[in-house]
Amino acid sequence: MLPNESGVPITRWLVAVGLVLRLFTTLALVPLGLGGPVYLVGALVLGAILLAWGVIGLVRPGDDAWARRLFVLSVGFLPLLFALLIAS
């Protein structure tokens, strides 16, 4: 079942939960020795930006521009994260 089959509010909650899991997943590379301090700081900043935007979507429901902006942010998130991983 797709998240949007349950309704918009549940979908927004699932997006927020997914963003929290994404933040923890990206930070898990540091204890594994794959990312250094540059990666840690960058992953925290990028993850906090995405998570903050996800929380904004929970607080202000009914705004489709929020979903588009979150999509654009998430598209830029991964290349920036890889660049930080290479830099560290």
Image: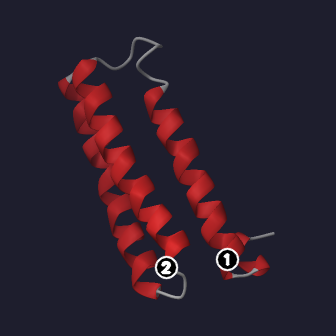
| Quadrant showing the C terminus | top left
The residue beneath circle 1 is 9
- Farthest residue in the front direction? 59
Q: Is residue 36 left or right of residue 31?
A: left
Disc 1 marks a residue whose amino acid type is Pro
Quadrant of the image occupied by residue 4: bottom right
Tell me whether the residue at label 2 lies in contact with that at label 1, contact meaning CB atoms closer than 8 angstroms: no
The residue to which callout 2 is attached is: 60
Looking at numbered disc 2 in the image, what kind of residue is underneath it? Arg
- Identify the residue shown where x is 39% and y is 84%: 65
Q: Quadrant of residue 66?
A: bottom left
Sequence order check, earlier mark of 2 and 1: 1
Where does the image place residue 16, in percent across and percent down from the top left? 57, 58
Q: In what element is the residue under mark 1?
A: helix
Query: Foreground: 29 or 60?
Result: 60
- 45 horizontally vs 19: left or right: left
Task: State the quadrant of the N terminus.
Answer: bottom right
Q: Is residue 68 above or below residue 46?
A: below
Q: Report the residue at 25% width, 45% height from top.
A: 80
- Disc 2 and disc 1: Cα gap in Å? 11 Å
Residue shown at the point (41%, 69%) measured from the top left: 71
